[in-house]
């Protein structure tokens, strides 16, 4: 079968031929891969800044955002049947008996760092015709979401973050009554999203649909389909090339929430200076090595303390976030059908993966498909 792999030794990204995997445990399922999204992490892996092949291999099959169809199930599989659509999760637990997080199924909170991530860290990914994995790592997808379910994984980042944000807000009365319906939880609060890539845009959609007055701040200048998307969901786009952080803060009044989705440390630090009183700052980007800069930590510390601010990092996600992502994709499509149609820029055959991963992203999300006729859909 075909797969797309990166060879760090020879610095190559190419199509390889591999033997198709087979079910070897009763609780495993075999998947035929339908769609695999390309993201910034793949770009970093293919620029050899990030990612590690499995022990003993000189290559890593990439791909961690996927939608697949079950083709075979092991004898102990109870929830899934051939023909079902599923989204597989990314992270697998570390082996250490003492890791409370991994031993309780919360490997996104792994203490030891010895977890693996499919398509990223020491485990082959999903950009292949077939894969085998355990039933417990699958979230069932309603057939009606076939066209967009590949976006579930990148959306889980926002879903996990939002759970944490609302939890924090509930601990701070009178901010949030736990009985508030999810679409009203952000009412009266302002949110600033940093970055206009897929993670930023999906984050903005999540925040806007939770009722936050949402702003998106990035370098991009109009005209741009991404800026059109921000407008279409009722959020406000502001370009950093035209407006400084200080001006933005004045415009937004108290900034209650910042959702960082750029992975640029200098930009992220500048934003921290405009976080409002009782504000929560969520970091989702993973920066590579970047130049050192001068900072004023005393001022940041003073603000964090005197304004009760929360600084929160978040990575990966668990089953609840996957389920929430699928619910929200359905909701987004009901609320903004035209926007949702533009999220997937195109579907391309695996042969085009290397150029797509290494090139500049054209639309919002490029998807590799192993089904015939790539672009057709
Ligand atoms: C993936 C996460 C992963 C993170 C760090 C992201 O692109 O969506 O699942 O944990 O990269 O490797
Ligand atoms: Zn990703």
Image (cartoon, rainbow, N blue to C red):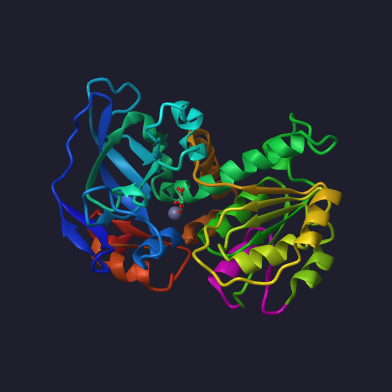
Q: Which residue is at a point 26% across and 30% down the rendered structure image?
A: 28
For the residue pair 302 and 344, the one nearer the viewer reads as: 302
Residue 80: image quadrant is top left
Can residue 238 be found in the magenta stretch? yes
Ligand 2, image quadrant it occupies? bottom left
Q: On the picture, is 4 further left or further right than 170?
A: left
Can residue 357 be found in the magenta stretch? no
Task: Tell me: residue 74, above or below residue 346.
Answer: above
For the residue pair 157 and 275, the one nearer the viewer reads as: 275
Q: Which residue is at a point 74% across and 29% down the rendered structure image?
A: 179
Task: Tell me: residue 12, above or below residue 145.
Answer: below
Residue 344: image quadrant is bottom left
Q: Is residue 82 visible?
A: no
For the residue pair 13 and 192, the one nearer the viewer reads as: 13
Q: Position of residue 71 (x, y in %)?
A: 23, 36
Question: What is the span of residues highlighted in magenta in the rendered image?
Answer: 222-242
Q: Position of residue 239 (x, y in %)?
A: 67, 74
Q: Position of residue 309 (x, y in %)?
A: 78, 49
Question: Which image quadrant: the C terminus?
Answer: bottom left
For the residue pair 74 and 84, the one nearer the viewer reads as: 74
């Amino acid at each position: 079968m075909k797969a797309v792999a990166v060879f760090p030794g020879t610095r190559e990204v190419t199509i390889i031929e591999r033997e198709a995997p087979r079910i070897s445990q009763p609780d495993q399922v075999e998947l035929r891969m339908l769609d695999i999204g390309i993201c910034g992490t793949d770009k970093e892996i293919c620029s050899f800044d990030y990612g590690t092949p499995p022990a003993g291999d000189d290559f890593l099959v990439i791909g961690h955002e996927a939608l697949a169809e079950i083709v075979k199930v092991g004898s102990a599989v109870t929830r899934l049947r051939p023909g079902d659509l599923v989204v597989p999760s990314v992270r697998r637990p570390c082996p250490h008996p003492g890791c409370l997080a991994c031993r309780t199924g919360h490997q996104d909170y792994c203490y030891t760092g010895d977890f693996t991530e499919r398509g990223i860290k020491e485990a082959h990914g999903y950009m292949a015709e077939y894969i085998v994995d355990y039933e417990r790592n699958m979230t069932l997808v309603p057939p009606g979401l076939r066209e967009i379910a590949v976006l579930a994984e990148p959306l889980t980042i926002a879903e996990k973050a939002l759970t944490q944000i609302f939890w924090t807000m509930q601990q701070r009365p009178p901010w949030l009554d736990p009985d508030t319906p999810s679409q009203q939880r952000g009412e009266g609060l302002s949110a600033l999203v940093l970055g206009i890539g897929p993670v930023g845009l999906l984050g903005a959609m999540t925040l806007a649909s939770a009722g936050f007055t949402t702003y998106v701040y990035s370098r991009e200048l109009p005209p741009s389909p991404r800026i059109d998307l921000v407008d279409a969901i009722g959020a406000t786009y502001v370009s950093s090339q035209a407006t400084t952080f200080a001006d933005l803060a004045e415009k937004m009044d108290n900034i209650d929430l910042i959702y960082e989705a750029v992975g640029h440390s200098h930009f992220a630090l500048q934003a921290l200076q405009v976080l409002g009183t009782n504000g929560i700052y969520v970091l989702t980007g993973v920066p590579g090595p970047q130049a050192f800069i001068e900072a004023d930590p005393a001022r940041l510390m003073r603000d964090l303390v005197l304004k009760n601010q929360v600084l929160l990092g978040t990575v990966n996600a668990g089953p609840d976030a996957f389920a929430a992502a699928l619910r929200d994709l359905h909701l987004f499509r009901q609320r903004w059908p035209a926007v949702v149609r533009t999220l997937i820029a195109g579907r391309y055959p695996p042969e085009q993966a290397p150029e797509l991963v290494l090139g500049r992203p054209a639309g919002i999300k490029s998807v590799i498909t192993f089904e015939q006729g790539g672009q057709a859909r």
